[in-house]
Image: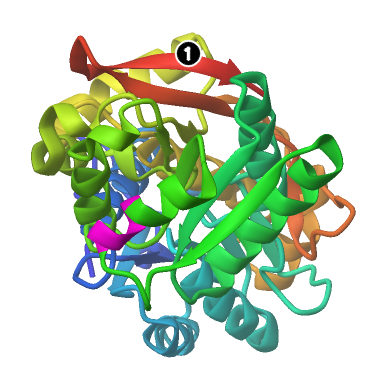
Amino acid sequence: MNTPPSPPGAEWTDGSSVRIGALVPLSRPGWVEAGRHLLAGLELAVREVNDAGGIDARPLELVVRDTAADPRRAAAAVDELARLGVAAVAGEYHSVVARAAAARADALGLPFLCSSAVLDALTEQPTDWVARLAPAQSHGWQIYAEFLLSAGHSRIAVATEPSVYWASGARILRDYLAPRGGTVIELDMRALPPTAVCDELVDHRATALLLLVGHPEPAVPIVKSVRRDQRLTEIMIGAPAGQPEFAEWATLLGDDGAAIPFLRYLPQRLSPLGARVATALSERLAEAPSFVAFEGYDTVAVLADVLRSHGADRARTAESWPRVAVEGTRGQIQFSRTPGISVWQWAWTPVQVVDRDPAEPGRFRILHAG
C-alpha cells in the first residue's frame, strides 16, 4: 500500500485518504513490462493529483495488487480491495484477467475503470459498474485487418494458443477478411514446434503470419525460426496484440524483431498534455513510455475528475460514467454505450498500426491509422 507524500505547503484537512485499488501484472507469468508501464502511469497521475491538492483536500492513495495474469488472483484482489474501502478499482492489462475482475466488481457494486484490456465481452451481461479506456478488440483488430488487405495480404496464417482472447482475435480477423477474399489459416501451437511452423507457412502459401501467442514463449522462438528460413524471406510477421511495443522485444530479438506490425493506441501527434506526460513518464521509466503507460495516467485522470465531482460514493461514481468529459493524454475521454460492448466504453481512443524501423529498431514507423 503506497501513501503519497503531501506536497510542499499542503495540509490535508482530513486524516483519511481517498483510495483507488490498482490491478497490475507485476510478476510472471504476467507481462511484467506492461505492468510496470501501466503502474508508472497510474502513479504519475496520483502524484499530480496530490500536488494539486488531492480530492477535496484529501490525498489520493493507490492500493496496488499484483494479478500475475491470474484471473482467480485478480478476483480475490477485488474482494480484498472492496473490504478495504476503496472508492474504485483501476488498471489491468491482460484481457482474461480483466474479465474476471470486472465480473467480481459488478457483483460487488464496485466501480472498475479498466485501463488496458480489450476483450469485447468484458462482462457477460451489460453493467453500469464497469467502464473502459482501451478500444474493444473488435474495433482495433478490424483496423489491423484493413491494414493487412491494404498491404496486399489475403492468405494469412495465425499461430494460436488456447485462450478466449486469442480465439476472439482469430474470429474477428476471419469475419472481416473472409467476405473480402481473405483466408485465415490457424496453426495450433500446442501441436507444432516453432520450426514446424515454417513448413506449414510454405505448404499453405501464406504471405503473412500473425502471432496470437504468448510472449516471450513461444512468440520469440517462432520469429527466430521464420526469420532464418530462406523460403520465407518475403513473408510478413505481424503481432496485433502489441508484443513489439516493449523494449524487451527488441532486447530478445534484435534486428529480427523489426518490421513486425502491431497495434498501438496513440495519436499521430500528442497534445501539449500528452507531450508533458510523455516527458514525465520517460523520466520515471528511464525509457520511452508505451501506450500502456498513457492508459494508466488517463485512468487516474478520469477517476480523479469523477471523485472531485461526485465524491467517493461508489454508486454515484458508477452513475457518472456517461457524464465524464476529461482531457486525456490521447484525446477527450467520454464514455458511451457501444453495440456489442457490455461496459461503458470510450469510443474510440486513437488506433495505429506501427512497427519497429529495420534501419533503427528503437524507432517506430506508423504504417496505418484507424
Instruction: Please name the residue that numbered disc 1 is placed on.
Output: 270
Residue 32 seen from this side: yes
Q: Main secondary structure of the magenta part?
A: helix
Q: Is residue 197 magenta?
A: yes
Looking at the picture, tell me which residue is in the foreground, 15 or 320: 320
Residue 333 is situated, as x and y percent measured from the top left of the image, at 67, 34
Q: Is residue 312 magenta?
A: no
191 shown above or below 113: below
Residue 329 seen from this side: no
* Mark 1: amino acid: Leu
Residue 364 figure quarter: top left
Left or right of 110 on screen, residue 297:
left
Give the magenta part as a residue range: 194-198
Quarter of the picture containing the N terminus is bottom left
Looking at the picture, tell me which residue is in the foreground, 230 or 145: 230
Left or right of 58 on screen, residue 88:
right
